Image: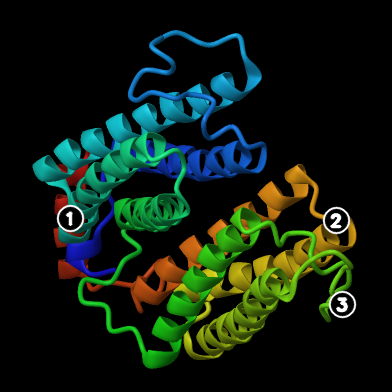
Amino acid sequence: MTPGSLPAGRSVRGLALALLLATGCLVLLGSTVRLTESGMGCSSWPLCNGALGPSDHFHALLEQSHRYLAALVTIGVATLFVLSRRRGSAALRRWTTAGVGIVVVQVALGAVTVLTHNAPATVAAHLVVGLLLLADTALVAAAAFGLLASSPRPGALAMAAVLVTGLVLVSGSIVVDGGAARACPSWPWCGPRAGFPWRIVDLQLVHRGLAAAAVALVISVAWQLRRSEPVASAKRQLAGLLLLLVLAQVAAGALDTLLRAPVALQDIHLGIAGAIWCLLVVAVLASEQPARSRLSPSQKGGARSQLSEAQV
């Protein structure tokens, strides 16, 4: 690891992991809100139907829980931003600053989404920014553990994999919002179900096409990393986990189709996709050095000194 990417203190690392977990849960809870049509359970913002406390109505409580968790994530992002100013690495400061900007945009979009009564454009934008926040919290956690390269140079294949995987996540949301989740009862081919117009079936076809491209790209990137990186490198380990998650996602997608898209399985499908997205982004920007690199005696002394200063 380079001096600029040394791990942060134990408390920062713990908070970064907790924030990543909370953001992942926030994305999943947002998916549940959408799938159960609870988005308008709270017709006002920021209060829920004029109340701050928990509601006794299912849809309102679900939407309100999403807002409570969003508030916790916002506090976590702000706290890590402040802590990173004190002793954080350059990478940690960079990604916590980006997190603050993303949260500001996301809060504004959340308000607009409610005030426009869940207009499709604002719902899609809200999801895109939510995915960016999820990726950012993954990068913050990676930076806190000293895994990010000081000056990453991702290749064209890796960037294509990140872009297409993001498009798969967005297209999946469009499939759900467009009522196309059950338009194709077969897998892997799309045999249209009677009663669904072709414009709805087309949403499924686009999503499946993007998903197939993403699977091919992610496997190519992971395989390339497995072959080219040192055995102990963080990139190699992340690549192995990526391969396992891709297999799990293919199975979840098949089950989701064959079982006619139950809500729980759709959430699992999104959860695995979000995990792939985060791991891919981190793997692309991770340090090329082994996770436990052997430093010279003088480098070790400098590293110990910086590690001591990084403890908070």
Dot 3 or dot 2: first in sequence order is: 3
Residue 67: x, y in percent?
43, 28
Q: Which residue is mark 2?
A: 260
Q: Which residue is mark 3?
A: 191
Residue 238 vertical position relative to residue 83 in the rendered view, above or below? below
Dot 1 or dot 3: first in sequence order is: 1
Q: Mark 2: which secondary structure? A: loop
Q: CA distance from mark 1 to mark 3?
A: 52 Å
For image coordinates 35% across by 58% down, the residue present is 139
Check disc 2 and give the amino acid type. Answer: Arg
Q: Which residue is mark 1?
A: 89
Residue 41: x, y in percent?
54, 25
Q: How many marks?
A: 3
Question: Dot 2 surroundings within 10 Å: few (below 14), some, or many (20 or more)?
Answer: some
Q: CA distance from mark 3 to mark 2?
A: 13 Å
Check disc 1 and give the amino acid type. Answer: Ser
